[in-house]
Image (cartoon, helix red, strand yellow):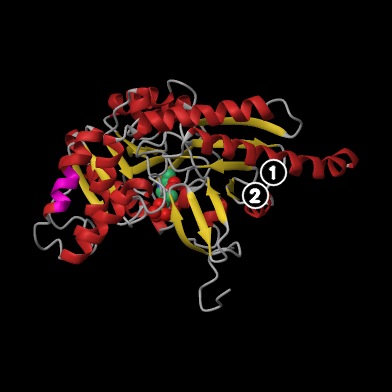
Amino acid sequence: MSSALMNTYKRLDVTFSHGEGPWLIDSDGRRYLDAIAGIGVNSLGHAHPAVSEAVAAQASKLVHTSNLYRVELQEQLAQRLSQVSGLSRSFIGNSGAEANEAAIKLARLYGHQRDIQNPAIVVMEHAFHGRTMATLTASGSRKIQAGFEPLVAGFIRAPFGDAEAVRTIAENNHSVAAVLVEPIQGEGGINLPPPGYLAELRSICDERGWLLMFDEVQCGNCRTGSWYACQGEAVIPDVITTAKALANGVPIGACMAGGAAAEVFQAGHHGSTYGGNPLACAAALAVIETMEAEGIADHAAARGQQILDGFRDRLAGVNGIREIRGRGMMLGIELAQPCGDLVGAALAQGLLINVTAGNVIRMLPPLILNASEADQLVDGVCSVVSEFLQQDAPARASA
Ligand SMILES: *Cc1c(COP(=O)(O)O)cnc(C)c1O
């Protein structure tokens, strides 16, 4: 492995040469069923013709101009994002962290406009919002923050899923301007909040004049069966951030806002050199068109349910399995013990999965998976999990 790269990732010793739909092919020609999709990025699978053609065509015409000028594809993309989100305006950046940085800046500006001296943002335990200074501070994991102090001021932490805790913060703190939360936590372990939680947060924000901001970088773009996960619960936030699957792998991120929040930024407040360039926007437009034309949200809901049912049939009640959970194609199996070793075991079987939060097997398969590939995924995961739990059974029995 290259020592010319900074040591930021512990990488598996495999490299891929090409892909087809939900399959990746490594440099030795071995095929892998990709159940992580570049961490929820390749939702239309690898080498989707609509995206490949849009990127190739745009690359041969114009890759980049500048936000000094009007960018027609960026205007078209913002229009399409409004249609699917119901929020009126977008800022286009290059990643999830940047989308959240935009949201954080927007919330602070909104606070100052309301004469709050040091506006604060309520964020959640186990949250993940990115690796920049503000977004790692907003994230609820000491592992991500440790060593990078001083952290950014102005964040107040609450337990995820506990609306009462946010009410208590509201009563005791008059500098809050916004709440930032993932409707379903991804890195934190595929954590679904209790029913009604997002609606409760909406009410609190309405009562207090706070912005409700959803980080849908991982759970958005049809993954959970609706364009954005919040739509599955009919809760309309003031801000949604998105990235990951938005352009199927071409770097992009967006911060969308509605109502008063859409009018907060004025010229000079925020920007990005690359953000919303013609290449990235052409890819995102192709993704949105394809997802809509092919009914990808409904497909994700159906295939996701098939996989979840498969796991529950085969693994529920098995010793060592704590919980099987998910919505649509955002799936987690929580084990009673750390299970990072499962990733390598699955790789050896030709299956790409991920482990997050130490003991949660995370699957974010491409949304285009067909029924037979979904069955293969269930078979593959259940077999590596069973093997893993059996291997470990004697050790646990003697512990
Ligand atoms: C991945 C992720 C981010 C960060 O996105 P990057 O593109 O890696 O900066 C932020 N929020 C959530 C919920 C994510 O899953």
Task: Tell me if label 1 and label 2 are in contact, CB under 8 Å.
Answer: yes
Answer whether residue 253 is visible to the viewer in this image.
Answer: no
Question: Is residue 279 or residue 87 the one in the foreground?
Answer: 279
Q: Position of residue 351 (x, y in %)?
A: 59, 49
- Residue 40 higher or lower than 301, as above or below: below
- Residue 64 higher or lower than 264, as above or below: below
Q: Is 286 on the left-hand or right-hand side of 228?
A: left
From this viewpoint, which residue is outermost toward the left? 70
Q: Which residue is mark 2?
A: 346
Q: Which mark sits nearer the N-terminus, 1 or 2?
A: 2
Q: Report the Cα–Cα distance between label 1 and label 2.
A: 6 Å
Report the residue at 49% width, 61% height from top: 149
Label 2 amino acid? Ala
Q: Which residue is mark 1?
A: 384
Q: Residues within 10 Å of mark 2 (few under 14, many from 20)?
A: many
Which quarter of the figure has residue 239? top left
Question: Is residue 268 or residue 110 the one in the foreground?
Answer: 268
Answer whether residue 258 is visible to the viewer in this image.
Answer: yes
Answer whether residue 277 is magenta in the image: no
Answer whether residue 77 is magenta in the image: yes
From this viewpoint, which residue is outermost toward the right? 398
Quadrant showing the N terminus: bottom right
Q: Is 181 on the left-hand or right-hand side of 385?
A: left
Report the residue at 33% width, 23% height from top: 234
Q: Is 174 on the left-hand or right-hand side of 333?
A: left
Report the residue at 43% width, 48% height from top: 21
Question: Is residue 80 or residue 45 the one in the foreground?
Answer: 45
